Amino acid sequence: MNVLILEDNAELALLWSRHIERRGAAVTCATGLESAVAALEGSRFDVLLLDIECAGGAALTVSDLAAYRDPKARVIFVTASRFFSDGLLFSICPNTCAYLHSGTPAKDIADMVEHYTAVRA
């Protein structure tokens, strides 16, 4: 299972990646649009964990690119905002499978990643 994390808070990305790696995943962390696009060009990801507030909307661009390159890739959006709490992301980004608060415990985020990786397989 390959996972891409787009999060500009390096400590939070590291926390999430450690929990996900314990489940046997290979994790790539990106801090902005350029590094996330470069990762997508070089690898195929089963699940993308994207902070919707990262780098001025880069998460939506990364989600669109991922959907184009691999329509089966699942996207879990995280945010500290309540802006998309109405479920709009599910209609904007067809590969969205979950929307979580960035304060969600890392273990629960890893559980979600593992679940949607299994669903894809």
Image (spheres, rainbow, N blue to C red):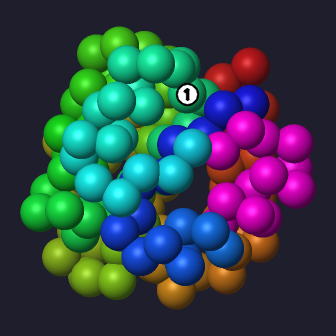
Foreground of the two, 100 or 16:
16
Tell me how many marks there are: 1
Q: Secondary structure at mark 1?
A: loop
Please tell me in which quadrant of the rendered image residue 107 appears.
bottom right
Foreground of the two, 16 or 86:
16
Identified at 28% across, 16% down, the residue is 68
Up/down of 69 relative to 105, above or below: above
Viewport quadrant of the N terminus: top right
Please tell me in which quadrant of the rendered image residue 110 appears.
bottom right
Q: Position of residue 74 (x, y in %)?
A: 50, 35
Q: Position of residue 10 (x, y in %)?
A: 48, 72
Q: Which residues are magenta?
A: 16-27
Up/down of 21 relative to 69, above or below: below
Up/down of 2 relative to 25, above or below: above
Identified at 18% across, 76% down, the residue is 83
Q: Confirm whether residue 115 shows in the render.
A: no
Identified at 35% across, 41% down, the residue is 36
Identified at 54% across, 67% down, the residue is 13
Up/down of 7 relative to 105, above or below: above
Magenta stretch: includes residue 100: no
Please tell me in which quadrant of the rendered image residue 118 appears.
top right
Viewport quadrant of the C terminus: top right
101 sits to left or right of 22: left
Q: Residues within 10 Å of mark 1 (few under 14, many from 20)?
A: many
Q: Confirm whether residue 101 shows in the render.
A: yes
Give, as a three-letter code, the residue at label 1: Phe
Mark 1 lies on residue: 45
120 sits to left or right of 34: right
